[in-house]
Amino acid sequence: MIEQFDIASETYDEDFTNTLTGRLQRKLVWKYLDEKILNRGVLNILELNCGTGEDAIRLVEMGHRVTATDISSEMLKQAQNKAPVNKDNVTFSKLDVTKLGDFQCIDRFDLVFSNFGGLNCIDEKEMQKLSRNLTKILKPNGALVMVIMPNLCLWESFYFCAKLKFSEVFRRKKSSVLADVSGLKIETWYYSPNMIIELFKPQFSKVKVRPIGFFAPPSYLETFVKKNQKLFRWISFLEIRFSRFAWQARLADHYYIELQLK
């Protein structure tokens, strides 16, 4: 998996970060995250699966201390290239989330954050282990914010129906799927919001769940989006205007879930 993400790092920003849908979905993530962290002073934040560093850099620019981690050395190189000249508040470290129990930190974290399906790369057993390990590095009442891909996406189901690929319509319901990431096949597990709440329930309680990409299509439909700019403006309006409804989360491309350490 490390090698696959190393290769994917070369085009990840082109394939997702800088797409119209990618930017729209990230805008929503930041909206909800800002509601959590604004006016709380300087926070000590751990980012899991930081990818090419788009979120880590923004958090640093807001004045927070960030430890940005990823399993891929090449992803981390891309992130470091984006880092501001003054790097005092950001550290980039290689980390496999399945080995978080071995992670050493001087100060416990106020917030652990993972964006855009990074944690969909681990199975249920590893999710439960992650929950236990996070209790060792989070401060009391610390927050865990994850952006996860659910096990059903309306846009994706419609897309496969239109392509007459009926066997793929409910592919996210399978135990695991070889999902496409920048042209590479990576084993992926999909989780409904309720599944995540149950997996983390012994250690964490639910605070908030919000859809990310209920109206906006997945980034692999970028060609369609670019050809229909007027439609996309309406999609953007609907996404931002009606994204507060938690029930949409289980049918969106991703969802934002905020948990608090008990």
Image (tube, helix red, strand yellow):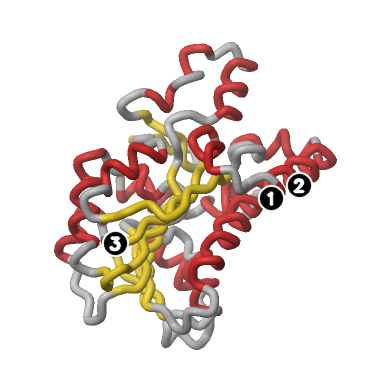
Q: Is residue 64 above or below residue 150?
A: below
Mark 3 and mark 1 lie on one chain; the one further toward the N terminus is 1
Q: Pointer 1 and pointer 2: residues touching (CB < 8 Å)? A: yes
Left or right, 145 with respect to 23, comes to left
Label 3 neighbourhood size at 10 Å, few (<14), some (14-19), many (20+)? many
Q: Which mark is residue 240?
A: 1
The image position of residue 36, as x and y in percent, is 49, 67
Q: Nearer the viewer, residue 7 or 26?
A: 26
- Examine the rendering and report whether any part of residue 238 can be seen: yes
Q: Pointer 3 and pointer 2: residues touching (CB < 8 Å)? A: no
Q: Is residue 88 above or below residue 15?
A: below
User: Which residue is denoted by mark 2 in the rendering?
Assistant: 237
- In the picture, which quadrant includes the N terminus? top left
Label 2 neighbourhood size at 10 Å, few (<14), some (14-19), many (20+)? some
- Examine the rendering and report whether any part of residue 73 can be seen: no
Image quadrant where residue 148 sits: top left
- The residue at the far left in this view is 102
The image position of residue 193, as x and y in percent, is 41, 40
Q: Residue at x 40, y 61 (%)?
A: 113
Measured Cα–Cα span from mark 3 to mark 2: 34 Å
- Give the amino acid type for the residue marked by disc 3 in the picture: Leu
Mark nearer the viewer, 3 or 1? 3
